[in-house]
Image: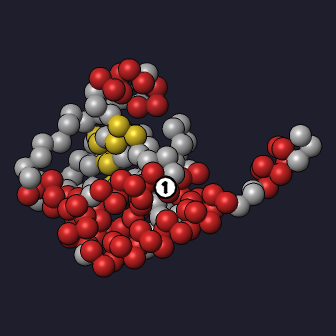
């Protein structure tokens, strides 16, 4: 789903542990370092915040992916893990591993690999859309990877 909610190369520049956007796959009621926050509400309604979404995404596509993921969990009667109210960034890698807290893909290429394997998302969003989306984004990822960036020029030009 990260490919839908964070669809550009630059989306992953802000998905860095310790920065504002959460990268660890977890949820909580109060904790803002988690991926999904479900603030306390009334008995009649619940609000959900999916926090890592990038402003460059297409809202409708991202929302369709978020809804599809939620429906998949409901259909399969998945039980959510325990909420994580502690600051995840202060946890050791061993503690995160022990608690089953995984990390989002680190770049667009990794996100596309994960998305390509998600059979439910492809079934829900449609094979034609998913194929075109992956094709377009893989081309973007390849173009980015063959570019010499300003940082590289500054770092290695004198070598």
Is 23 situated left or right of 141 in this image? left
Is 44 situated left or right of 3 in this image? left
Would you place residue 65 above or below residue 22 in this image? below
Q: How is the image coloured?
A: secondary structure
- Residue 87 in percent (x, y) is at 41, 31
- Residue found 11% across the figure and 56% down from its top: 74
Please say whether residue 55 is visible from this viewpoint: no
Please say whether residue 76 is visible from this viewpoint: yes
- Residue 139 in percent (x, y) is at 53, 69
- Residue 126 in percent (x, y) is at 25, 75
- Residue found 38% across the figure and 20% down from its top: 94
- Residue 83 or residue 77, whichever sits in front: 77
- Residue 25 or residue 33, whichever sits in front: 25
Residue assigned mark 1: 109
- Residue found 59% across the figure and 59% down from its top: 10
- Residue 106 in percent (x, y) is at 49, 46
Would you place residue 6 above or below residue 36 in this image? below
| Residue 91 placement: quadrant | top left
Q: Residue furthest toward the bottom?
A: 128
Is 41 situated left or right of 60 in this image? left
């Amino acid at each position: 789903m990260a490919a839908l909610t964070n669809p550009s190369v630059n989306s992953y520049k802000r998905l860095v542990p310790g920065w504002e956007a959460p990268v660890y796959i977890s949820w909580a009621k109060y904790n803002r370092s988690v991926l999904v926050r479900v603030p306390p509400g009334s008995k009649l309604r619940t609000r959900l915040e999916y926090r890592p979404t990038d402003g460059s995404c297409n809202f409708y596509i991202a929302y369709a992916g978020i809804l599809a993921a939620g429906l998949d969990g409901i259909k399969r009667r998945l039980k959510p893990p325990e909420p994580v109210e502690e600051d995840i960034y202060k946890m050791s890698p061993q503690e995160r591993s022990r608690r089953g807290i995984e990390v989002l893909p680190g770049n667009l290429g990794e996100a596309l690999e994960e998305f390509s394997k998600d059979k439910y998302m492809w079934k829900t969003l449609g094979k034609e859309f998913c194929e075109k989306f992956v094709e377009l984004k893989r081309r973007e990822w390849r173009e980015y990877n063959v570019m010499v960036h300003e940082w590289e020029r500054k770092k290695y030009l004198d070598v």
